[in-house]
Amino acid sequence: MHFSSSVFIAALVGIAQAQTPEGFKPSVNTKLDVMFNSTAVKTPGELLSKQTTSTQPRIAISRNAVNSTETFVFVMLDLDVPPAQGNTTRRVLLHAMNTGFKASQQRMANGTVLLTSSETGPAAYLPPGPPATDTKAHRYVELLFAQPANLQVQASDFANTQARIGFDIVSFGQKNGLGAPLAANFFTVDGRAGASASGTATASGGIARNTLQPFEGAAGHMDMSFGLAGLLGGLAIVAV
Ligand SMILES: *[C@@H]1O[C@H](CO)[C@@H](O)[C@H](O)[C@H]1NC(C)=O
Ligand SMILES: *[C@@H]1O[C@H](CO)[C@@H](O)[C@H](O)[C@H]1NC(C)=O
Ligand SMILES: *[C@@H]1O[C@H](CO)[C@@H](O)[C@H](O)[C@H]1NC(C)=O
Ligand SMILES: *[C@@H]1O[C@H](CO)[C@@H](O)[C@H](O)[C@H]1NC(C)=O
């Protein structure tokens, strides 16, 4: 009795420590620190604004989870893209896949190691833009993988919307020899006007789905290549 209840409590603690959303596979318990300038994702699933998340986050990981020779891949997914017409299942969108991360010399306040990469691809960061007309906040999951030495991914693999929408990290991982994620985190962004953390809920009557408005500020900000700007235009139709 005593034994089984402590096992039960241990199981509860395990659940409480998950860094990935409930039901998300693969589930991950090690925390990836995700920092948008001065705003860190403190608790998994924390609500952040579009404004806060408009530029690529920095990432850090506990010192004993890395070594200086290892290279990492960062992946960010939106799990809640509205369904295609005639379908009721929400879709996954690949918001970022960036290769070449290495442990830097920089330590964060609690001793975590900042990971840096000079690469912005193969899939450049797309800022969250959940639609004002949606019925829920979107969940954005960040995953860190060890990068296989022979990973063959190119920007052209992710150049159009179709390559990013319906993205399946499990089958991608199997095909490309990624192991289990080393660390993860997730946050939410609510596109609806009046949503508490949304600094940029610009419309009062709701933004039409095909407007580019949620992305324009970010486009100017990031000095995006034509390719990414075009991709954002395409994605505005599905609202991510
Ligand atoms: C490190 O500190 C930051 C900021 O205080 C915190 O958000 C984060 O969860 C900590 N990271 C770990 C791995 O404990
Ligand atoms: C975050 O910092 C970068 C680099 O200093 C800056 O370009 C960017 O505008 C900032 N993002 C936000 C959302 O403040
Ligand atoms: C560092 O990581 C590399 C790549 O995963 C691994 O082969 C090596 O054994 C690790 N070294 C140490 C000291 O953990
Ligand atoms: C509905 O969408 C899901 C997710 O994109 C897909 O797996 C499924 O095949 C679609 N169903 C139909 C009937 O098109």
Image (spheres, rainbow, N blue to C red):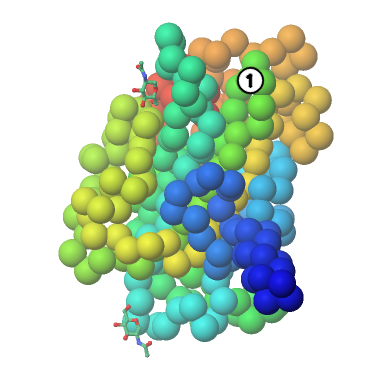
Q: Is residue 37 visible?
A: no
Q: Residue 26's spot in the image, x, y percent? A: 44, 53
**Which residue has dot 1 on it?**
134
Q: Is residue 114 left or right of residue 149?
A: right
Q: Residue 88's spot in the image, x, y percent? A: 48, 17
Tell me: residue 150, above or below residue 94. below
Q: Residue 128's spot in the image, x, y percent? A: 56, 36
Residue lying at 28% horizontally and 46% vertically, measured from the top left? 171
Q: Is residue 7 visible?
A: yes
Quarter of the rendering containing residue 34: bottom right
Residue nearest the viewer, comparing 56 with 95: 95
Residue lying at 41% horizontally and 72% vertically, measured from the top left? 102
Residue lying at 74% horizontally and 34% vertically, measured from the top left? 198
Tell me: residue 121, above or below residue 94. below
Q: Is residue 221 left or right of residue 150?
A: right
Say what amino acid the circle numbered 1 marks.
Asp
Q: Residue 43's spot in the image, x, y percent? A: 71, 56
Count of numbered labels shown in the rendering:
1
Q: Classify 10 Å Cα crowding around label 1: few (below 14), some (14-19), many (20 and above).
A: some
Image quarter hosting the N terminus:
bottom right
Tell me: residue 128, above or below residue 186. above
Q: Is residue 153 left or right of residue 182?
A: left
